[in-house]
Amino acid sequence: MQWKTILEDRNRFFWVLQGAGWSGYALVHYIGSLMHEMRDIYALVLILGAYAGFLLTVPLRYMYRRIWDSPPWSLILIVLAASYAMAALWAVVDNATYWEIYKFGFRPESNWFYFKNTIAKFYIMLSWSGLYFGIKYYQMLQDEKQKALMATSMAHQAQLKMLRYQLNPHFLFNTLNAISTLILVKENELANRMMSKLSLFLRFSLDNEPIKKIPLAREIDALMLYLDIEKVRFDERLNVTIDCSKESESALVPSLFLQPLIENSIKYAIARLEQGGEIIVSAKRFGSDLLIRVEDNGPGAKIPVDQMIDSGGVGLANTRDRLQALYGKNYSFTVTNNEPHGLRIDIRIPFEQVETA
């Protein structure tokens, strides 16, 4: 039986602790008796005493369950009264086994001995009650902590899904608008090709959870599907170069996080150049990090670069927010002017790979 299974099953955990605790009680008292000259039958007295304590504390468990939500002072008074009542019963059983079995019917002359024994048992019962409430409160705190972690995780996942799905309407609007334009100018063949590419791209999007990471090689495949759509519009005006090291292709990255960056470059660079332009996507490993660069040879930014992310449309801010949600502070996302002209986006994230068995 695994300890994890025992800890997760609260009822089983109680009985394991109950048995171990009272067995330990009997063992400690037996070891203490070895220091004195006690007959062997004293071991039976100890076992019967521990067994009586085991049985009498079981009703306490069910009583404490019923009064769990009582006001604090009422709870304390009930615990004290219940502990003393069980201690008195335990003392009666303990005295009976001691005087009938060990002393063979001998009785002490004063009742003071019985009272002292009851008080001693009361302290033990009170300690048992304290342990019970302590363990229960600890389990409640763990449950609340687990719920808080689950709620945080669900909120985190919802945020990531929102950020990913925020791009779909933006991308779909642009693509469907382009298809509509092709139909209006009677370019039905091109419109059909573009619709087919769009279908493949959306299928890829649906097959990959927004909260999961995928290998960079698959991300590049998705990017090429998107570029196939854009090449229907721009034809030879759009040139794309992919330069990813072999090692970087297996690195895990957020799904479809390159597409909005490329879309941003097409919108603000390629579309504004009569002769078209070039977009370069490169990736390599550097120590424990993955470095990704997206650059173009467009006209560059017309506003200060440090304001580009928040004013550069959905793509840049969305990608930054997704990276922050996934990696916390362990990432960088910078936008700078490219040389001799154009824009460059540098991304640094932890280098992660799929764990293989």
Image (cartoon, helix red, strand yellow):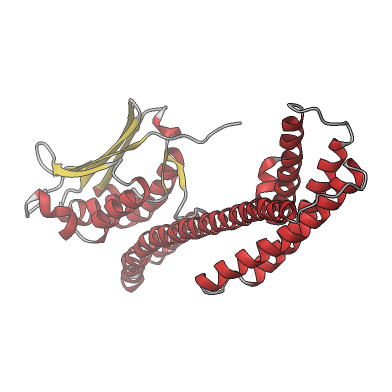
Q: Which of the pair 128/302 is nearer the observer?
A: 128
Instruction: Residue 10: tell me if it is visible.
Output: yes
| Residue ID at (67%, 66%) | 82
| Residue ID at (44%, 38%) | 217
* Quadrant of image for the C terminus: top right
**Residue 295 position (above or below residue 32):** below
**Residue 202 position (above or below residue 50):** below
Q: Is residue 276 left or right of residue 54?
A: left
Residue 213 lies, in percent from the top left, at 45, 46
Q: Which of the pair 230/235 is nearer the observer?
A: 230
**Residue 26 position (above or below residue 162):** above
**Residue 188 position (above or below residue 4):** below
Residue 220 lies, in percent from the top left, at 40, 42
Residue 74 lies, in percent from the top left, at 55, 73
| Residue ID at (42%, 33%) | 249
Q: Which of the pair 94/18 is nearer the observer?
A: 94
Residue 188 lies, in percent from the top left, at 40, 67
The number of numbered discs placed on residues in the rendered structure image is: 0
Q: Is residue 59 left or right of residue 201?
A: right
Q: Is residue 32 left or right of residue 334?
A: right
